[in-house]
Amino acid sequence: MTIVDDDDEARRLLGERLREARKYLGLTQEEVATYLKIPRTALTDIENGQRRVEAIELTRLARLYRQSVGYFTGEEAAGSGFAPDVAHLARAAAQLSKTDREELGRFAEYLRARAAGKGS
């Protein structure tokens, strides 16, 4: 755990973590900016550590990127802990349309129910 005292350095590290998470999930700056309802240039400034992130923006980004706020601020380690194949599926699913992701979710529920039925 590394807590940074210098504001500029803290903003730079926060932006770096946010950019890495966005890229990891295969999202474009345009998609994330639209989600946040901010200009893409504002997201670029955030990721470059040149703009402060409002608390509500950071909370929404954490939810979108499936990490805790503490991960992005450097107060805790990454919490994904997903196996590589599961992480791959998440990245692939992030590139699907909303409708296709919903269909994928229904299929996952079907597979889970089928597996539970075999154990009975």
Image (tube, rainbow, N blue to C red):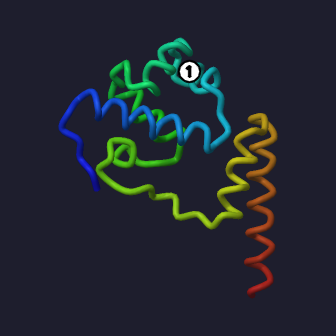
103 or 4: nearer the eye? 4
Locate residue 60, reporting x and y percent: 46, 33
Locate residue 44, reporting x and y percent: 51, 20
Amino acid on which disc 1 is placed:
Ala
Q: Residue at x 68, y 61 (%)?
A: 86
Residue located farthest toward the left when viewing the structure as drawn: 5
Looking at the image, residue 16 sits to the left or right of residue 94; the answer is left
Locate residue 83, reporting x and y percent: 63, 67
**In the figure, 28 relative to 90: above or below?**
above
Looking at the image, residue 33 sits to the left or right of residue 77; the answer is right
| Quarter containing the N terminus | bottom left
**In the figure, 21 relative to 106: above or below?**
above
Quadrant position of residue 21: top right
| Quarter containing the C terminus | bottom right
Is label 1 in a helix, a strand or a loop? helix
80 or 41: nearer the eye? 41
**In the figure, 35 relative to 21: above or below?**
above
**Which residue, given by chain and number where applicable, does mark 1 sit on?**
33
Q: Residue at x 46, y 27 (%)?
A: 47
Q: Residue at x 57, y 37 (%)?
A: 22
